[in-house]
Every structure is written in C-alpha cells, then in structure tokens.
Image: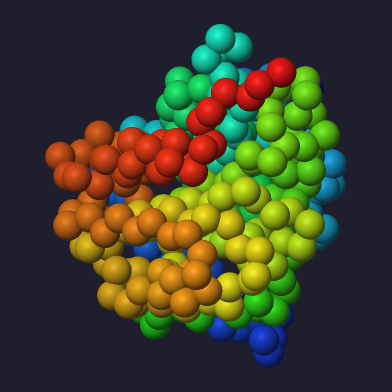
Amino acid sequence: MKMTTNRLSEPCCNHLGVRLELCNIVVLIAVCFFATQALAQPDDSMTVIAPPGQIDAVDLGTGPLPGARQQEAWHSQYGSRFVRNVTVATLTPFLPDAANATGAAVIVAPGGGFRTLSMENEGWNVARALASQGIAAFVLKYRLNQTPAEMEAFKRAMDEMFSNTGRSAPVLEPEQMKMQLAIQLEDSRAALSLIRRQAAEWKIDPDRIGMLGFSAGAMLTMATALVGEEAKPAFIGNIYGPITSVTVPADAPPLFVALAADDPFFASSKFGLIESWQAAKKPVEFHFYEQGGHGFGMYPKDTTSTGWFNAFVSWLKMHGMLHRKTE
C-alpha cells in the first residue's frame, strides 16, 4: 500500500434539467450536516490543521477530478478532523487481528454534504470499531465538490448555502443518481473492485463486502446499491441519510437504517425507503431513535442513538456476516 498524493475536487451541481432536483438534495445534505453537527459537540469553530499521516491510504486510480483548482485541506471542528477539496480518491484499510477476523468487510463512507468529509467521527473511528469486532473496514475518501481555499471564505460560503436552502423531502430517482453522483459512484465502484481483487491478501470473503454510509455518505451508499451496476455490495447501511421512496432493484441487498426522530431534516420525510424495501420483499431493519439529532456518528452522547453501532453489528451477525471463513 502507498501514501497518496492529495489534490482537489470540483462542484457537481453545475448541470441543468434532470440534475437540478438531486443537486438541491446534495445542498440539503450539506446544510443538515454542518447545521446539526454542533448539536453533537459544542466546539463548532473551524481550525486549520496539517494533513494527518495517511501512509496506508491506497490511491483508487480514478484520477483527479477534472477542472479542480483548490488543494486538499484539513481542519478540526467539534473535536474531530475533517477534510475538504478532495480530488484524488483513496481507500484506507483497518484490518482486524488475524485471530479475530471473520471474513466480512465494510466500506465506510463518511458524510459532509459532498463538501467535506467527517474523516474521524464517521470514518476512522467507525472503521476501528468494526475492526475490533473482526470486520475488515475500509474508509473511503471520495472526491468532493470544491469549496473556497481560504477558511473564512469557506465559512461564508457555508453560511450563504444555509440561508438559501429549502427543506423539501428529496426524491432519489435512478437517472438522477447516476448523473449527479457519477464521480462519487466511480470512486465507490473502484473501492469495491479493489477489495475484491485484494480479498485473498486481506483474508476477506468477496461475497461478504458491504457498505456503510453517513448522511451524504449514506446517499452514496444507496446510489452504489441502486445504480452502481457491477458494484453490488452484499449489504448496506444508511445512517441518517435520505429515507424517501426509491425504485428497488431485483437484486437489492439487505438494508440497515438508523435515524433519530429529532433529526431536523430527514425525520419528517416519512419512511418511503423502508416501505420500498418492504414492498420489494427485501430484508430491511430500521432503528428510529427518540433523540440523537443529525451527525451523531461515533460521538459520545446521552441518547439511545449511540446504540446504532452495536445494533448494526448484531444485524450483520444475524445475516451470517460474522461467521469465520472456513479454509
């Protein structure tokens, strides 16, 4: 594995017609992420930090985002680390001890409204917890919409986005997802392909590779399962992402969903996603927590939403994903 050379990313919301509605959804996800992370941790100030060491990050080979102008930048907020202006997608493995390995694997897709990635709270910390359970975890640093290079300009851009964004329930249509999330889907497909190629080396069962996403990462996870063509994750987890109705493919995987009832954006959009999976007679588990807000991830909170991780692991076990591989 090699250390990647980090560069940039570019906006995906510059298309008309069929892309417009999903573009609004992307902005909504960005708003809900930034506006509600503060509910989880009190320190919402953004502080520029040096890029952390990423010696295990594997370049996915999808190339730099065309037309990108800004350099990848890191900052701390809410006691956690974030990255923005990502243009080169990477995958960072967190492998379990060989004696504890189950053979299952999960790609972890952090959220951040496609403008930043919550690499610590919704990435590395999740991956470490999965590895401790014997599950190989891989944090996907996917390419993002560009934001201003200067922190103050970035803050102003976020404030402007917040003030101009509506709160209509998103409708996720297949063609919209394919077009609007084309770049990110390329990254998630490449991640699944890489893990399958390296399955023997990493002691992973290629038939037990799933994907778990948070907020915008949940949207990417859903798109990967619904329109990702050859990607076909074995199972998917949607943690406080959109839950409106979708067209469910015949080969849809088991779905795990966790959402707080006081999530200010997605909790009021009804449960179309759950109903769609049920109507298609596909396995689905839905945890609707009384409290937790949006963006709780692995943050310590005095709410039952902190139980989502143990529930997810139990769900994986129920589906046979934690049984050891037999030689």
Q: Taking 178 as reference, is 306 above or below it?
A: above
Residue 128 in the image: state x and y as whole percent.
48, 25
In the rendered image, which quarter is residue 208 located in? top right
How many numbered discs, if any?
A: 0
Is residue 45 visible from the viewing direction of this image? no
Which quadrant: the C terminus?
top right
Q: Residue at x 82, y 47 (%)?
A: 62
Q: Is residue 137 left or right of residue 215?
A: right
In the rendered image, which quarter is residue 96 located in? top right
Q: Residue at x 50, y 70 (%)?
A: 281
Nearer to the camera, 118 or 258: 258
Residue 157 in the image: state x and y as whole percent.
49, 63
Nearer to the camera, 78 or 242: 242
Residue furthest out toward the front: 326
Which quadrant: the N terminus?
top right
Q: How is the image coloured?
A: rainbow
Q: Taking 133 as reference, is 225 above or below it?
A: below
Nearer to the camera, 71 or 253: 253
Is residue 321 visible from the viewing direction of this image? yes
Residue 187 in the image: state x and y as whole percent.
73, 50
Q: Residue at x 52, y 55 (%)?
A: 254
Residue 49 in the image: state x and y as whole percent.
50, 30
Residue furthest out toward the bottom: 17
Q: Residue at x 75, y 29 (%)?
A: 199
Nearer to the camera, 102 or 184: 102
